[in-house]
Amino acid sequence: MLPGLSRKLYKPWVLLLVTSGYIVGELGHYLIGVTSRATARDLHYGDKACQLNVSSGVGHGETPIACGSVLNQTECVRLHMNGTFYCEWDYNGLGLEYQILAGPSYIAVFTVAGIFLGVAADRYNRVNMLAVCTLIFSIATFFMGAVDHYWELTVLRMILAFGEAGCNPMAAGILSDLFAEEYRGLVMSIFNWGIYGGYGIAFPVGRYVTAANIWDLGWRLSYYAGGFIGLILALLTFFTLREPQRQAIGEERNNTTGEKVTLWQVVSQPRMVLLCLAASIRHMGGLCFAYNCDLYYQTYFPEVDLGWWLFAVTICIGSVGVVAGGVLSDKVVATMGVKSRLAILALSQLIASPLAFGSVYFEPLGAMISLACSYIFAEMWFGILFAILVEIVPLAVRSTTLGLFLFFMNNIGGNLPVLVEPLSKSIGYRESLWVFYVGAYFLSSILFLLTMFLMEPKVSPKPALEAPPQRTKGLDNTAFEAESCRL
């Protein structure tokens, strides 16, 4: 604990520190989606395609023949307008190798490691383990900036996944033991905002730091900087945080029988299975957009710089959704119990679905407005989801259950976006995002609603038993009946 840090400030400090670590981890996770084109051209992986040469000064809407409609190099380099050659044949950052790098290579390690780290978190010091995990993903992020081959980038990304796998179950356990129920939804929402914080920061860092080419490092400097900041946060976590006392919360607190619940009994419940399926589908939609967002806008609107727009929408508007979801679920949970959190989940994703469609349908201005409105509702989900989990899972198996939950959620939701590539070749890149991004939002809202009906009703506290009336000294004559009463 920091010297002089009062008890009043300690809890906010813990929340700030673990959230900052999560932001840096997610920055390393999502940077590849923004730097992929520059990285692919440097390391030579993925597909080559005919693309608009932005340096030619010709706008996307001015070309007589669209670069993307040309399928071979010979015709691509011959396209010109008034003597200006406006197309180039080069790596576009897409292709199966990119999809594997972004999704399966990361998810495979992240999900398996999450189980073992979750089991360890139920038995050992979570603060020390969180510091070590932060150190691991920070070192991996730093050295990703020094790679010369595709396989090196893939291996380091897998190491990054191992370190980040411990962040959510460990930090969620620490925070749930520190904060009371009336703040839990908000606290979990703020912590899980780290996903959107890292994702949002990746846009300006990946785009503008790469373009600035500081010290001739290009895209590599983004990874160096992120890894260095992570190293500092790992040290602060180890030296300033202390392991909190583990506490029973939510439904477990209402269990007066003292009966122990096994891990299998928890994870095999129909409500847990359906909740995991709903979360997996929603996660698929989010990751599908996250991995393809920057590439989508660069493909369809290459002359429009949307880097700061995407940053502002993700960080600012996404923050509104995260906080609003946490506060709203905390307010109504007192009357409806955990069912209220699921009702908010279902409604928020339903509202976000048509707005998400607009973000990959309209022209840039309309797409950004639609995306901003979508984020207000869509980004409520993750913090509320983990508030639900820590409230319905017993203390003894909480971190293990979170690790298992993340294993299935990330394996389903994290690997399905790979199908965007083959589907896009059949129906189009934009149309494939309608299926895996917009469709996932809508389907998850239906599944969250069905899960709500499987949750137990809120248990009202039993009123205290009235004390029996005190007996007066002497004989008990309450059964005495006077002679006059019989008349």
Image: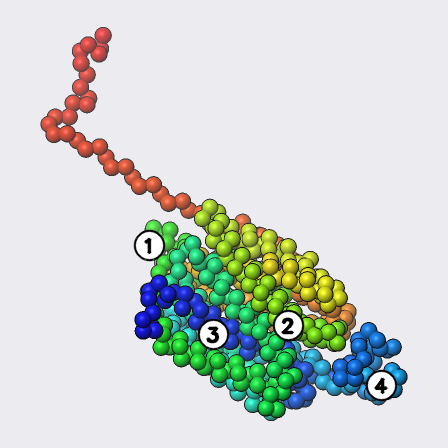
Image depth: mark 2 or mark 3 in front: 2
Q: Is residue 204 above or below residue 484?
A: below
Residue type, mark 1 in image: Gly
| Residue at the spot 50% in from the left edge and 57% down from the top edge | 326
Q: How is the image coloured?
A: rainbow
* Callout 2–callout 4 Cβ contact below 8 Å: no
Q: Nearer the viewer, residue 477 or 463?
A: 463
Q: Which residue is mark 1?
A: 258
* Callout 4–callout 3 Cβ contact below 8 Å: no
Q: Which residue is mark 4?
A: 84
Look at the image and tell me in which quarter the C terminus lies. top left
Determine which of the numbered discs, if any, sits on residue 308 in the image.
2
Residue type, mark 2 in image: Trp
User: Percent from the top left, x then y, of residue 58?
Assistant: 81, 80
How far is disc 4 from disc 3 in space, using C-alphas? 48 Å
Image depth: mark 4 or mark 3 in front: 4
* Callout 4–callout 1 Cβ contact below 8 Å: no
Tag 4 or tag 2, which sits nearer the N-term? 4
